[in-house]
Amino acid sequence: MIYWAPLFHFYQPPTQTPAILMKVSNESYRPVMDVFDEFPEARATFNINGGLTEMLALYGYTDILEKLKKLAARGQIEFTGSGKYHPILPLIPREEVERQIRLNHNTNRQYLGDVYQPRGFFPPEMCYSYEIVDPIVQSRHDWIIISGIACPAGWPMDVIHRIDNIEGEAAVFFRDDILSNKISFKDIDGHGFIEHLQQMHQGSGDIYVVTAMDVETFGHHIQHWDKLFLSKVYETLAPNAGTPGAMREQKPLADQHRKLFEYEKSSDAKEIRTVKISELLDIFPRGHKLSPRPSSWSTSAEDIRMQNYYPLWKDRNNPIHMMQWEHLEITLETAHKATQVADNPSSMEFATIARNTLDPALHSCQFWWASKKPMWDINMIYRGLTLQREVLLNAYKAISLSGCQPETKKEYYYKVVAGRHIYDQIMDALYID
């Protein structure tokens, strides 16, 4: 048996426009839900970051949340944990990692209810370092999924390796990067995907394959890919796919699509079963304790060799990245100090605003859109920077209104001035580039 465990990642940044959120919801989120409604035997693991869950509720897209709850209640999907606002966890302080995990859980429980019971954890952008394992295990997640490039051992297909740490251990699943990227960039069709899985199986026993990609791939990034790929694969793997007279009624397919999937009714397709990732824990034995490489799902072997582990979010050769993170470091330090020194109603009010604004200000997209590999969007960079500046404004206001020493107020005023200088440098780069 070949067990295919797909993960679909739902995320939009907190700075996303209502128009784009509506477009993505109509082109991807709803159509993908319809695929799972059409094929009740379909199984998958979903990650939806709490920031998006909150946005969907805020903009009235409660039908999407209700469909998510229904699929989970039927046992078709499971959810994972993550960071609420999709921060790059290895690059932020541990206390912020713990807070993002906690906020994500609380938000998703609020909007998804009791069906939100994550056993696994999806680190945003699959950005991994050993330092994030303890907070993940502490928050009672049994497993973590990371990029295949992080695997330091022979490729696991019939065992599940573990990461050992102070708080215990977590099972680790490695994404099949090659296969996932083939799907994401339309380099493979449903026929080729099934054949690829079958070729991976050498008949020596059960194996598993884990893929993971943005759910927006299906219908938004690639038009109609929810139907042309996802529906066709689930149709192939349906238990009654090869049973004459038992096939569900469907709308006529275009001749080329019908011909492409004629082979699907063969008995070979029955060798493949779709599962939720957590189900693999009950099927396959545990392997070795490993130390995965720091990496992301966009990291290459050359990046790892150069210790440039998160190239789309913090590339030492990217001056915009360096300035963004320098500005964020000042923002974090000032916000934390504001929380510490606020000692009266006025200062506490501003400190609370700074603290709550800091959470979304950590989102990853502001750095991704500054990577120039090839992503470059001055508005997404600017919106992220504006969030950080809002944190700084309120944090310093809290410090200035507090009863802390004048020397402390002066010290943090200079930090704000330094932040303003960095902001101006980034803005100059956005105007010129």
Image: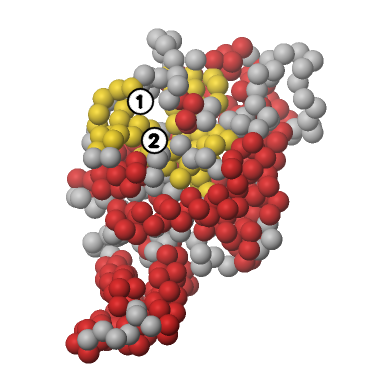
Q: In this view, does 41 lie above or below 182?
A: above
Q: In this view, does 214 lie above or below 331?
A: above
Cα gap from disc 1 to disc 2, whole angstroms: 10 Å
Residue type for callout 2: Trp
What percent of the width, then of the height, locates residue 389?
39, 78
| Numbered marks: total | 2
In screen coordinates, is 16 left or right of 178? right
The label nearer to you, 1 versus 2, is: 2
Q: Tell me what residue is drawn at x 53 percent, y 27 percent.
A: 275
- Specify few, some or many for label 2: CA neighbours under 10 Å numbering under 14, 14-19, or 20 or more: many
Q: Does residue 231 appear anywhere in the picture? A: no
Q: In the drawing, what numbered circle is on residue 182? A: none
Q: Do the residues labelled 1 and 2 touch (CB within 8 Å)?
A: yes
Q: In this view, does 164 lie above or below 286?
A: below
What percent of the width, then of the height, locates residue 254?
74, 34
Q: Does residue 164 appear anywhere in the picture? A: yes
Q: In the drawing, what numbered circle is on residue 143? A: 2
Q: Choose top left, top right, bottom left or bottom right for residue 291.
A: top left
Q: Tell me what residue is drawn at x 52 percent, y 30 percent.
A: 276
What percent of the width, then of the height, locates residue 67?
68, 44
Q: Which of 301 and 361 is in front in this view?
A: 361
Q: Tell me what residue is drawn at x 75 percent, y 32 percent.
A: 253
Label 2 residue SS: strand
Q: Choose top left, top right, bottom left or bottom right for residue 410.
A: bottom left
Q: Is residue 72 above or below residue 246?
A: below
What percent of the width, then of the height, locates residue 9?
51, 46
Q: In the drawing, what numbered circle is on residue 160? A: 1
Residue type for callout 1: Ile
Q: Tell me what residue is drawn at x 30 percent, y 78 percent.
A: 341
